[in-house]
Image (cartoon, helix red, strand yellow):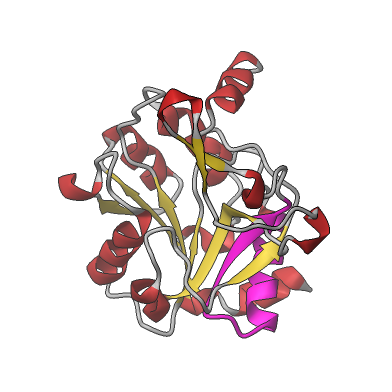
Amino acid sequence: MINNALKSSKDNLWIVIPARQGSVGFPNKNRLLFEYTALQIPDYLKGRTIVTTDDNVIKDSAKELGFIVVDRPEALATSTANTRDVLLHVKDTLKIKDNDIMIMLYLTFPERKFDDIVQVFDFFKKNNALSVLCKSKIDKHPYLCLYEKQDNKGTQVIAHDLYRRQDYPKCFFVLHYVFVSVASEIKELNKNLYNDNTLYYPIERKIDIDEPEHFEKWTKNK
């Protein structure tokens, strides 16, 4: 039933896969990860899937799969470029309509399955959301965190004087496992792809290859 809801929306739906060439920590990371996301896309959405990249190897792979390729400009292919501006570039380049829906999939989650995508999409549709990200439980509360200072001193990240943990406000960890948004809403988001109107779909914490220990473990198992 969830899959039918996504299928019925496919004519105004776009899947965007950001896949720049450079990687500060892991050379050719996106080349290694590309197939894990690309092969999850069903045939009926291949013509609605966009790969934004400056990597000719990834461009060739994307075209072979029937995806749309958007050439990533140099200014948006640096380590400091943010994904919001990349999505806006895709929207402008392909003249995507404001009321279309864009699903963004980072390559750094190779465990992600298509069922995960449709579940987040179903949550997006049922709640009439403008944008959706994922959330997971936190290991440590931010009220316990301090900024490091010189001489082994610290200062609170969040100023408070609460000592009972049951008095701490409920918090969660933002996870960019699947991102869904009405196209017109993207310009209203911050560079981390959320604002006060964003809803969050609860999931268990997932392995993110951008975290060094996860990348090293993942590559050893390949």
The image quarter in which residue 174 lies: bottom right
In the rendered view, tell whether residue 207 sits above or below residue 43: above
Q: Quadrant of residue 149?
A: top left
Q: Position of residue 194 (x, y in %)?
A: 48, 67
* Residue 132, above or below 19: below
Q: In the image, is 220 to the left or to the right of 51?
A: right
Q: Is residue 221 magenta?
A: no
Indicate the quadrant containing the N terminus: top left, top right, bottom left or bottom right: bottom right
16 with respect to 1 (left or right): left
Side of 109 where 17 appears, left or right: left
**Residue 216 position (above or below residue 200):** above
Residue 172, percent across and down?
Answer: 67, 57
Residue at 71 percent across and 68 percent down: it is 3
Residue at figure coordinates x 58%, y 81% from the top left:
129
In the image, is residue 128 part of the stretch drawn in magenta? Answer: yes
Front-lying residue, 130 or 119: 130
Image coordinates for residue 135, horizontal then vertical, percent: 66, 58
Q: Which residues are magenta?
A: 115-137
Q: How many marks?
A: 0
- The residue at 47%/28% (across/down) is 32
Q: Quadrant of the C terminus?
A: top right
Q: Residue furthest top?
A: 220
Percent of width and height locating residue 67: 41, 53
Q: Between residue 127 and residue 171, name the one nearer to us.
A: 171
* Residue that appears at 59% across and 23% down: 213
